Amino acid sequence: MSWLFVLSLALVTLPDSPAAAPRDAEAAKGKQVFQLCSGCHSTESDKKKVGPSLRRLFKRSSLGDGQPVTEKNIRITIQKGRDAMPSFSEALSPQQMDQLIAYLKEL
């Protein structure tokens, strides 16, 4: 069984989080997609887990590597990975990536 299959299965079967609901449908779906990221990244506080907190990500001036916080740079980081973060280019469909970005913009 491949890890992509396991992640896809987990994405479909995870229950909704009790945190506040996102405002639009794409972001709501993105919140579900974020479950793949939640083991390493938090959104409820600024506390670092394995990776940095993503709370208020789009309100920051730069990413951990010094690049400006733009949708393009965040997409590249998710697709290619960085440092200890693996690539998610094969784990997320383009639609899931759009949903995830919509959710991250609401944080």
Image: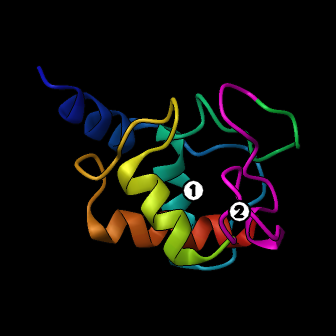
Q: Residues within 10 Å of mark 2 (few under 14, many from 20)?
A: few
Mark nearer the viewer, 2 or 1: 1
Looking at the picture, how far across and down is residue 6, in whole percent?
A: 25, 28
Can you give x and y, in whole percent of width and height, for residue 21 in the image? 71, 62
Image disc number at residue 31: 1
Q: CA distance from mark 2 to mark 1?
A: 8 Å
**Name of the residue lying farthest toward the front:** 66
* Other-residue count near label 1 (Cα within 10 Å), few / some / many at <14 / 14–19 / ≥20: many
Magenta highlight range? 49-68
Name the residue rendered at 55%, 64% in the picture: 74
The vertical placement of 50 against 56, above or below, is above
Q: Which residue is mark 2?
A: 21
Instruction: Say whether residue 48 is left or right of residue 29.
Output: right
**Residue 15: horizontal and vertical position, in percent?**
52, 39
Sequence-wise, which precedes: disc 2 or disc 1? 2
Q: Nearer the viewer, residue 17 or 54?
A: 54
Q: Secondary structure at mark 1?
A: helix
Which residue appears at 37% of the width and 55% of the height? 79
- Left or right? Give the position of 105 relative to 62: left
Amino acid type, callout 2: Ala
Q: Residue furthest left?
A: 1
Dots 2 and 1: beta carbons under 8 Å?
A: yes
